[in-house]
């Protein structure tokens, strides 16, 4: 940072251009392949082939291996045992979260939070809908029963019309959580929108299981929404099989170009055939953007269908 300050105008201009490029990449990131939400939660560094690429070819997560098992990590900050989660790092439903050390072998420290009372489920009557507020834990749900459709407030976002109570995404700020409400005038601020202090997903900082060091993979609900929240984590089991994308299989000397799942190595394009489970769904995994596999749930009736684009 200090060297930047002593740059001449050319340095400042170059820095500005670099910032614009990074901003453009962020916009395209949501359309890129790979388990991006998980990489973001871990604060892994994207690696590009060249400056013209909008999508990363892989991520560097080596800093995870240097983390202490007795400390908690979130948003680039480090918490010692028994430290309380700072409000700047917590979301609305994170209540009394404290960094706790696990005494179980191979587990890591994680934040443990007080359980908030379950949000009351409202049975919506016919012709009614729920109006919610994203700035409160239970969204402060209120049932609205308009006399006619014309009475329902709408929000115009990126040339798309949303009805009162509907969630919407802002293209320029994909991290925002927004709900259409009366009075919206295009300003994506509370009470219409909030930016969570950390991912509302299955965040690694709140789980004692050391999924990354075990080389597990996040599982998404479907491929279209794979860059939102992942549902669970998949770890290696006996019987998991790698299906190579090309034969004969040739080991890549550059491990940064390979995905690691447990003790299995996969090249880009290789697929994983997980051990069959007793659930009503199966899991389709592929090595898209190393080092972590991209996995999605699919119906067992469609287990043989390829849901991934050709690489």
Image: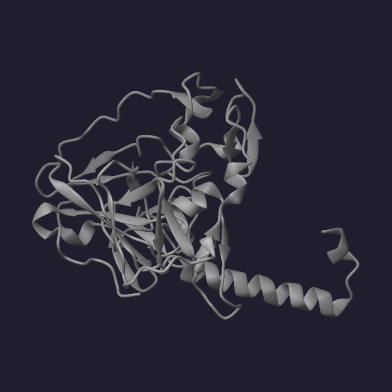
Residue 34 occupies quadrant:
bottom left
Q: Is residue 297 left or right of residue 193?
A: left
Q: Is residue 80 left or right of residue 306?
A: right
Residue depicted at x 35% and y 39%: 139
Q: Tell me where residue 288 appears, x and y as whole percent.
A: 39, 65
Res. 123 visible in picture: yes
Q: Which of the two residues, 159 or 170, is positioned nearer the viewer here? A: 170
Residue depicted at x 83% and y 80%: 10
Residue 309 occupies quadrant:
bottom left
Q: Tell me where residue 265 appears, x and y as whole percent.
A: 41, 56
**Quarter that holds the N terminus:** bottom right
| Residue 230, above or below 77 | below
* Total tally of numbered discs in the picture: 0
Q: Tell me where residue 47 appears, x and y as whole percent.
A: 57, 66
Q: Is residue 273 left or right of residue 25?
A: left
Residue depicted at x 12% and y 52%: 300
| Residue 270, above or below 21 | above
Residue depicted at x 56% and y 71%: 48
Q: Tell me where residue 123 appears, x and y as whole percent.
A: 15, 36
How does the figure colour the protein chain or chains? one colour
Res. 195 visible in picture: no
**Quarter that holds the C terminus:** bottom left
Q: Which of the two residues, 205 or 260, is positioned nearer the viewer here? A: 260
Residue 302 occupies quadrant:
bottom left
């Amino acid at each position: 940072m200090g060297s930047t300050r002593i740059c001449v105008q050319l340095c400042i201009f170059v820095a500005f251009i670099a910032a614009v490029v990074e901003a453009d990449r962020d916009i395209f990131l949501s359309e890129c392949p790979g388990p991006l939400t998980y990489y973001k939660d871990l604060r892994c560094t994207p690696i590009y082939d060249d400056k013209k690429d909008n999508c990363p070819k892989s991520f560097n997560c080596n800093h995870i291996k240097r983390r202490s098992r007795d400390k908690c990590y979130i948003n680039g900050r480090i918490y010692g045992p028994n430290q309380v989660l700072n409000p700047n790092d917590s979301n609305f439903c994170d209540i009394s979260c404290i960094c706790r050390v696990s005494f179980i072998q191979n587990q890591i420290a994680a934040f443990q939070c007080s359980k908030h009372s379950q949000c009351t489920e409202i049975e919506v009557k016919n012709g009614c809908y729920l109006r919610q507020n994203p700035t409160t834990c239970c969204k402060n749900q209120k049932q609205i029963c308009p006399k006619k459709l014309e009475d329902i407030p709408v929000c115009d976002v990126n040339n798309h019309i949303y009805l009162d109570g509907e969630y919407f995404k802002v293209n320029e700020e994909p991290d925002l959580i927004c709900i259409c409400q009366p009075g919206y005038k295009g300003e994506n601020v509370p009470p219409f929108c909030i930016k969570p202090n950390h991912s509302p997903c299955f965040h690694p900082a709140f789980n004692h299981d050391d999924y990354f060091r075990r080389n597990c993979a996040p599982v998404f609900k479907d491929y279209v929404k794979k860059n939102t929240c992942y549902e669970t984590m998949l770890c290696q089991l006996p019987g998991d099989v790698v299906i190579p994308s090309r034969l004969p299989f040739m080991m890549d000397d550059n491990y940064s170009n390979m995905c690691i799942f447990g003790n299995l190595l996969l090249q880009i394009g290789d697929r994983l055939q997980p051990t069959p489970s007793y659930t009503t769904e199966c899991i389709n995994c592929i090595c898209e953007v190393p080092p972590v596999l991209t996995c999605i749930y699919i119906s067992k009736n469609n287990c043989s269908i390829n849901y991934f684009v050709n690489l």
